[in-house]
Amino acid sequence: MKKMRGISLAALSTVALLALAPPVSAQGDLSVGRKMLVEDNPGELWIDQGKGLFYQKRGPNKVSLEQCDFGMGPGKLEGAAARLPRYFADTDRVEDLESRLLTCMTVLQGFDRKALIKQAIGRPRTKGSDMEALALYVTSHSNGMKVNVTLNHQKEYDAYKAGEYIFYRRSGQTDFGCVQCHGEPNKRIRLQDLVHMTSKAGAQEVASTWPAYRGAHYIVRTMQWRLNDCVWQMRLPDLKYGTDYSIALTTYLNHRGNDAVMQVPGFKR
Amino acid sequence: MKQLRRNFLKLSSGAGAIAAVAAAGLLQTGSTWAAPWNKSGFESKAVADIQKNLGVTNLIDSEDIVITAPDIAENGAIVPVAVTSKIPNTQRIIIIAENNPFPLAASFDLMDGAEGYVSTRIKMGKTSAVRVIVKADGKFYMATKEVKVTVGGCG
Amino acid sequence: MADPMRIRAKLQGDTADVRILMRHPMETGTRKTSSGVVPLHFIQSVIVQHNGKTVLDAQWSQAVSQNPFLGVRVKGAKVGDKISVTWTDNKGDKRTDEVAVAAGS
């Protein structure tokens, strides 16, 4: 455990902002706008885009993703995303939604994994990446269903424990960890509420609202993007897309978010 | 009058028709409806000029116009604004973000089959009053709502 | 070619609650990128029709948000009625989509 002097300037300035910000009520001042934006979410436009990509014969092998198994059997999408991450025997690892899509696009369609990863996070104000649209399309088949991430397999349990460790672990040049922003209620940076992920409700919000339309980027983003951005905010080394670090964190958060009702796309300012 | 406009737009594909309609005095109404897109209104930088260009006169404050929008917008690029006009025979709803470089954001002509209601999202460069003007039975009514625009936190 | 809209039209009483999402960049003409200023590009006109009859005729500026939303309410609607939406932008691009009014829940 680091001592107080380890607290960085970034952390201090965050604390200062948190303290000085005028009181804003997420229930009052902001809720009207949030509700209006969620009800008619431009992210819905990406569902059709993802559907087109899903059924199109693509890649060197010229096949669709209809044979992709997201854990409920090949081509079975209903409720599949609500149970991710989970262990997959064919790859002998725990995979989240995006890494499973990477597996199918590589194995079934013959795409080059590195090239896919390079394009996985789309540029703002574009149509976004194929990955982002596909992730939303697959997840939309879990809307209205409950998050149900189990830890029955040893590797699922291991991923959960690793995610928990990462969540609380402070590291890097700023000595920062997820828990500093997301371990207490009512924290925010300027106007942005920080989700209280160590509470059940906070974990449920995380588990049930991604992929989401990111208003400031005008495209749909996935959980991999969110974690990538958090890691960047903490000034840690770049998070490699689809790697165990992010799958572990997602397993930890989603399992703790169990029983939340899936509703995607979410809307994030 | 609405039906007249439809007919006019149909006719206007032929120059001869325009001449005929102009001769009939239909272009002399002072209304803006003959233009396909109100360039002068949309390019006005002052609210007063917009109102002039849209033919707005004798504005009456009205509590029968309900503006639904956030008190504080988390992202000024997507500010939801819904307008409900309870004024009978609402014909037009105009949305103006007063502090925008070009304040006139949108104008909606409602025909017989539409309720006095529209909902959309607009960009707001900074904190501003959102002014809504409703035209009903040829008269103009107004309501405003202040929307604070903040800067975001994490990028 | 422009992307399809997403239109929902649900009956509430005898009014159809119509909600339309469109994909469009709605460029203000002032945004700068590494390759220069992005030209003005925005939807100028949106027309909503109910069984072929125009019920809403909108004029927009570039201040309407990217990937625009439009909500309108159409009176005297029945399940199965046709709601069609057409937008036209300042470059002359155009898109029309249509849905049938669905029963309310």
Image (spheres, coloured by chain):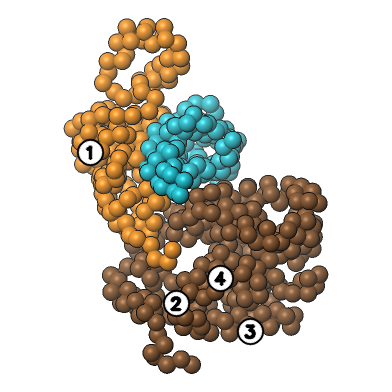
Chain colours: A brown, B orange, C cyan
Label 2 resides on the chain identified as A
First in residue order: circle 4 vs circle 2:
2
Residue type, label 1: Ala
* Residue B82 locus on image (x, y percent): 38, 46
Q: Marks 4 and 2: same chain? A: yes
Q: In this view, does A166 lie to the left or right of B7?
A: right
Q: In terms of secondary structure, where does tag 1 sit? A: loop
Separation (CA) of disc 4 from disc 1: 48 Å
Q: Mark 4 points at which residue?
A: A238
The residue under the point 35% across, 21% down is B34
**Secondary structure beneath label 2:** helix
Q: Which residue lies furthest to the left in this view?
A: B58
Q: Nearer the viewer, residue B139 or B45?
A: B45
Give SS at disc 3: helix
Say which of marks 4 and 2 sits in front: 4
- Label 3 packing within 10 angstroms: few (<14), some (14-19), many (20+): some
- Tell us which disc is closer to us: 4 or 3: 4
Say which amino acid is labelled 4: Asp
Quadrant hosting residue B101: top left
Residue wearing tag 3:
A161
User: What chain letter is assigned to the residue under label 4?
Assistant: A
Residue A259 seen by the camera: no
Dots 4 and 3 on the same chain? yes
- Report whether A91 appears left or right of A239: right
A244 is higher (above) or lower (below) than B80: below
Residue type of the residue flagged with mark 3: Lys
* Residue placed under numbered mark 2 in the picture: A181
